[in-house]
Image (cartoon, grey):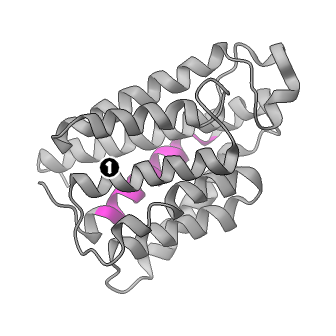
Amino acid sequence: MREIGSDNLKAMLIAIAGRIADSRERLNRLDAALGDGDHGASISAAFEKTVAELARLPDPKPSEIWLTTARCLMNGMGGASGALFGTLFLKGVAPIQGKERLVKADFDELWAAGLAGVKARGKAEIGDKTMVDALQPAVLAFAANDNIAAAWPAAAEAASNGAESTRELIARQGRAKYLGERGIGHQDPGATTIALMFEALDSYWREMTNGKT
């Protein structure tokens, strides 16, 4: 499949919600080492709300789906995390405005816009021990593959490696920066969430192309 319509796009977000719900306690534990320990609970609840809100939309366009997700993440999580994860989706709305179906180039644009928005809002770069350490490699890996079927696994692998790399970093942004060297050895929960998102999207794509969805 070279084009993705609204039904598939909603299903992709449902897949993300399920993966994050399954990882809720893991994310809470990661956050407990670097923050207040509720990241898993808050983002899982926000994506649960997203799924419920998407089910209420009558025949939505892709941009409406992406905007609804942004709003649910911002309002459902609150704080810095809600703003950053919400921005990831919010900035991806403009590139797909008015489109009925999305192709590979559309995803390239929406992910690039989301990444730029997150970096600008969080003032974070690679190596700061934030979600950017997983998001930027994933976005670049996705864009580097012309074939969308190859882009999802490449992005998922890059995001996973990026998340794992945060274990050895000293945080320079967010609450974790106050831990200094005590944060070394702990994986960033935001970066881990990004990895889970792309893993879910890769799994969904594999199942879809194998005729299982």
- The amino acid marked with disc number 1 is Asp
Is residue 17 highlighted in magenta?
A: yes
Q: Residue at x 24, y 53 (%)?
A: 105
**Direction from residue 124 to residue 111 in the image, left or right:** left
Q: Residue at x 70, y 13 (%)?
A: 185
Image location of residue 129, percent across then percent down: 66, 27
For this orientation, the residue located farthest to the right is 178
Is residue 173 highlighted in magenta?
A: no
Give the quadrant of the N terminus. Answer: bottom left
**Is residue 102 shown above or below 54?**
above
Q: Residue at x 28, y 47 (%)?
A: 204
**Is residue 43 shown above or below 137?**
below
The answer to which of 98 and 29 lies nearer the viewer is 98
Helix, strand or loop for the magenta stretch, by majority: helix
Image location of residue 34, percent across then percent down: 78, 29
Q: Which residue is mark 1?
A: 108
Image location of residue 191, percent across then percent down: 58, 34
The answer to which of 116 and 139 lies nearer the viewer is 116
Q: Which residues are magenta?
A: 9-24
